[in-house]
Amino acid sequence: MIRSVEIKNLRGIREGSLSDLTPLVVLVGPNGAGKSTILDALLIAANPRPPDAFGQAVQRREGVSIVAGARWLLWKAGQEGQTEIHVGTDSYTRECTFSIAGSSKEHTAIQGAIRDQDADGKSQQTPIQLGFPAGQLPGRYGFFKPLGDVPEVRFLDPRSVGLRTPLHQLYTKVVEQGLIQEVIANIQTLIPGVQDIKILAPEDVPVVYLIFADRAVPAALAGDGIWLLLHLTFELAVQPGGLVLMEEPEAHLHPGAIRQCARAILAAVRRNVQIVLSTHSLELIDFLLSECRDDDLDQLSVYQVRLVEGVLKSSRLPGPDVAFSRSEIEDDLR
């Protein structure tokens, strides 16, 4: 599990850190407070494939070309020194450093290194060199090991095509793990009359359908909120462990669906998946608290974050104290 992250010169964060991370971390703060950048830092540095994660961090920003996106992943487009990200578990640390090696309208070149150190003090450093021409993400780098007990890092954002696993593939994994009845029960609380969820293949194309007594409806046509909830529920259900990152999972969801999302998040945490999410929803926090069992509260922490001239400021609320500080959290969300 990731316990700490330290950031220097990444996007809008000139410097800052978070420590004492728990299995469920909730980031709150106004727009531009650095929440997305914290998620990007964890995506890159905690990942068993840091260079691939670098490309994901670039691609998940809409409205910016890959060339420009790579450049602006660095503080002030790399004009004020290299970017550094440090992450640590109970027994491992990783240091990622990178800088711009060259940039033009057609190409941005990134160079850097990944340095891993285990509990015995043994370290390994791997250089990386990445190129970002328009529409391509080539790179040259060596072999990386997972960071301690973090075998996988996933950024869940069904709204982003580049980060989205096809729903029928997720459905298959859910069925294989014997969790489909749990998912169906959640959907039935939101859509009365749903009897089943199945894959049908009109025109030989696999499509996930909601099955009613008298009809079958493609999940994609059941409404954006239902489709997003299905996607997030499936994704969380099939995670074998590791770290899951989520940005505003409540977006486009009805309050009832937000409650189901909170249940899916807590179910994943109980299966030893660490989740770090950002939110602007007081309802999501309220639902997480109301669905928590006594032992779940110790797994939760809320970080109130803000940026002051590029310096990340934060205050940490342990799970048992979150309910008592609700009004203070609400000030950050309203």
Image (spheres, rainbow, N blue to C red):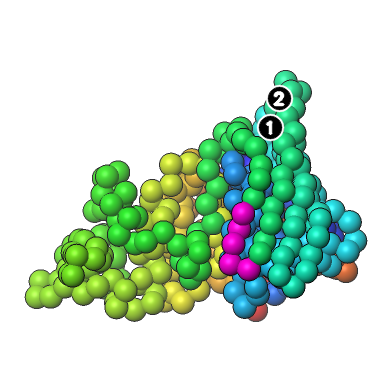
Disc 1 to disc 2: CB gap under 8 Å: yes
- Relative image position of residue 328 (x, y in whole percent): 70, 68
Q: Secondary structure at mark 1?
A: loop
245 to the left or right of 114: left
- Residue furthest to the top in view is 120
- Relative image position of residue 178 (x, y in whole percent): 26, 45
Quarter occupied by residue 254: bottom left
What distance separates the C-alpha of mark 1 from that of mark 2?
Answer: 6 Å
289 to the left or right of 95: left
Residue occupied by mark 1: 92
Residue 74 visible to an observer of this rendering: yes
The region drawn magenta spans: 134-138
Residue drawn 52% across and 52% down? Answer: 154
Q: Is residue 248 magenta?
A: no
Quarter of the image where the N terminus is located? top right
- Relative image position of residue 260 (x, y in whole percent): 39, 63
Q: Secondary structure at mark 2?
A: loop
Main secondary structure along the magenta-highlighted residues:
loop
* Front residue of this view, candidates 247 and 129: 129
Amino acid type at mark 2? Ala
Q: Is residue 135 magenta?
A: yes
Quarter of the image where the C terminus is located? bottom right
* Front residue of this view, candidates 90 and 319: 90
**Label annotation for residue 226:** none
First in sequence: mark 1 or mark 2? 1
- Residue furthest to the left in view is 214
Amino acid type at mark 1? Tyr
- Relative image position of residue 255 (x, y in whole percent): 43, 74
Residue drawn 74% across and 63% down? Answer: 108
Q: Tell me: residue 251, above or below residue 44.
A: below
Residue occupied by mark 2: 119
Residue drawn 72% across and 48% down? Answer: 129
